[in-house]
Amino acid sequence: MEQYKPNFVRVYGKSIEALDFQSPVRTFLTKKSMKSLRADSDLKTVALHHLIRLKDRKNAEEINAMDKHFKDTNYEPDPDRVKKYVHLIREASIDEIRKHDVILCTTAVGSNPKILEACSIHQVRMVFL
């Protein structure tokens, strides 16, 4: 009998994502809040905001180009481009989440619309390690 090994994705909140991929989208980061915010470096390879930017992913090329544009323009607000960026991130996230068996996230992030849209939730269980 073959052993089943579920694949998983770690979904972080917008504030933690913004530490790795800054954009003109408002995240309410302060110097004080940034001191305690950290993504687990061991989970970087399964973090949703990194996975959607991998070369072989559906919208990765466009997302990476927009990340570069925002950086090159010093994150100046551009409402049309930001709207498109948010839509791309959402679509890429939903597509990526659907490829995984297990979603690791906090309770607050678990109610994120992109997670709810990506999967039909039959049971939610909080596990404390």
Image (tube, helix red, strand yellow):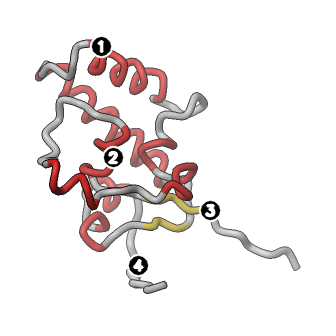
Q: Is label 3 or label 2 in front?
A: 2
The relative height of residue 48 versus residue 8 in the rendered view (above or below) is above
Tell me residue 68's x, y (percent): 36, 19
Q: Which residue is mark 3?
A: 7
User: Which quadrant of the figure has residue 59?
Assistant: top left
Q: Which residue is mark 2?
A: 17
Q: Is label 4 or label 1 in front?
A: 1
User: Which quadrant of the figure has residue 27?
Assistant: top left
- Along the polypeptide, which appears first: circle 2 or circle 1? 2
Q: Residue at x 56, y 62 (%)?
A: 8
Mark 2 → mark 4, Cα distance in angstroms: 27 Å
Q: Which residue is mark 4?
A: 122
Name the element at disc 4.
Answer: loop
Question: Along the horizontal axis of the image, is 116 left or right of 6?
Answer: left
Name the element at disc 1.
Answer: helix
Q: Residue at x 40, y 82 (%)?
A: 123
**Badge 1 amino acid:** Asp
Tell me residue 45's x, y (percent): 57, 49
Question: Along the horizontal axis of the image, is 112 left or right of 1?
Answer: left
Mark 3 → mark 4, Cα distance in angstroms: 18 Å
Q: Is label 3 or label 1 in front?
A: 1
**Badge 3 amino acid:** Asn
Q: Which residue is mark 1?
A: 72
Tell me residue 55's x, y (percent): 58, 28
**Badge 4 amino acid:** His
- Is disc 3 in contact with disc 2, using a CB cutoff of under 8 Å? no
- Quarter of the image with the N terminus in it: bottom right
- Along the polypeptide, which appears first: circle 4 or circle 1? 1
| Badge 1 density bin: few <14, some 14–19, many ≥20, Cα 10 Å | few
Name the residue nearer the viewer: 19 or 82: 19
- Along the polypeptide, which appears first: circle 3 or circle 4? 3
